[in-house]
Image (tube, rainbow, N blue to C red):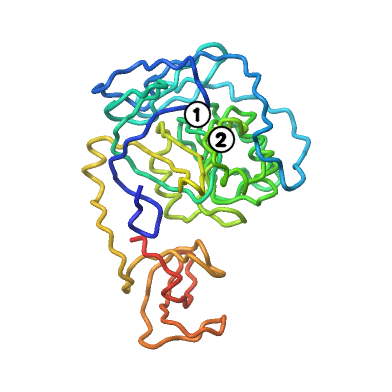
Amino acid sequence: MAYPLGWSVRLQVVVRRERWPGGSRAGAVALVYPGQMVEPDQPVIRLKHEERHEELSDLPRLSLPAVTRKLPAIQPAGAAHHLNDTGTMLAVPTLGEETVPAGLRGRVVDVTARGGVVIESQVVAVQGVLGAGPQVAGILTLWQALGKGNSCSRQPIPPGAILVVPGPLSFLLLRHALNSGVVGIIASSIFLRDLEGFLHADLLELVNSPNAEALQSRLPPLTIMLTEGLGSLAMPARLLQLLSCYQGRVVLLSGWTSVRQRVLPELLISLTAAEAEALPAQEPELTLVPGARVRICCGDYRGRTGEILSLFLHRQRLPSGVYAHAARILLEEGEVIVAALSCLDRIG
């Protein structure tokens, strides 16, 4: 999918996605037919679980020592998490037979030979920088960190959720989410050691593998999408505010990342007809002018967003010593900086 603005968000776009849980599923049976309208929490595929005797030797080996921290016992949340708009609960996978929810609201356009269901839907689409794990559907849930002195393991997380974490991930939080029955997690960033320790795989080999899609289904059952990538960057406030508007919705998340096939992780949030009409049409405007919202794509302020206050008529000497055409930027945090135009992406 093309993202015309520098910000990897499409406020409304029509997509077609095959609903497929990943891996080789010989017992998949479609429960819907082409032309049928489906809801995000509606089962569209029935799977029969079979005992797995696969060798995981195809997974790339960990390049860094695995992180092995002793975690406290975590009890799954006892109360069922219900949708705000439909009042129905998203099914959590169980042993034996499993039904796969659509994750999208829209029209079924095809049923593939393997039993996958292709759905056309009008969505808000968010593209990540890096991810891991197969396609999953779950309830979008914002993580509310506890105060200082409280362990994140005490934070109750509803099973079947897709968790939004505003800041960087940690190995401990990933393990807590996995043990709580969370199916997916969206965060800003993570250190390489924590990510490879959790996946127990070499990240570079994983995203460069010619068989990347198949390998995704052999990772721990928690799909991950990072909006900023590796490191300790925070999620832009504008993106967090957007996701909070759709809290409680059933959404579709894919962590599949492949350099060879140019595939990046994505989050799809289906829109109702009323919401689609209310959202402004996205006309890509890339011109850098005063008043435009921009995102800094490199340098010390990489990942930060703000507004252009003014453009310099002449090239400016930057901290690196390079002379370049530049702009004065008011960051969301209130700080005013000077940045090269080549380092700016317009996002609104």
Label 1: how many Cα within 10 Å (few below 14, some 14–19, many 20+): some
Residue 103 drawn above or below residue 269: above
Observer-nearest residue: 193 or 347?
193
Do the CB atoms of the residues marked 2 and 1 lie less than 8 Å apart? Answer: yes
Q: Which quadrant of the rendered structure holds the C terminus?
A: bottom left
Residue 114 drawn above or below residue 150: above
Q: Which amino acid does label 1 sit on?
A: Gly
SS at circle 2: helix
Q: In which quarter of the image is residue 272?
A: top left
Q: Name the residue under label 1.
A: 22
Q: Which residue is drawn at 48% across and 16% down?
A: 47
Residue at the extreme bottom of the image, as rendered: 314
Estimate the x, y position of residue 284 in percent, counting from the top left: 28, 59
Report, in whole angstroms, how far the alpha carbon at label 2 lies from the one at label 1: 8 Å
Observer-nearest residue: 75 or 187?
187
Q: Which residue is drawn at 36% across and 34% down?
A: 17
Q: Which amino acid does label 2 sit on?
A: Gln
Observer-nearest residue: 84 or 61?
61
Estimate the x, y position of residue 161 in percent, counting from the top left: 51, 31
Estimate the x, y position of residue 277 in percent, counting from the top left: 21, 43
SS at circle 1: loop
Q: Is residue 303 left or right of residue 170?
A: left
Residue at the extreme top of the image, as rendered: 96
Q: Which of marks 2 and 1 is nearer the N terminus?
A: 1
Q: Which mark is residue 257?
A: none
Q: Name the residue under label 2.
A: 216
Disc count in the image? 2
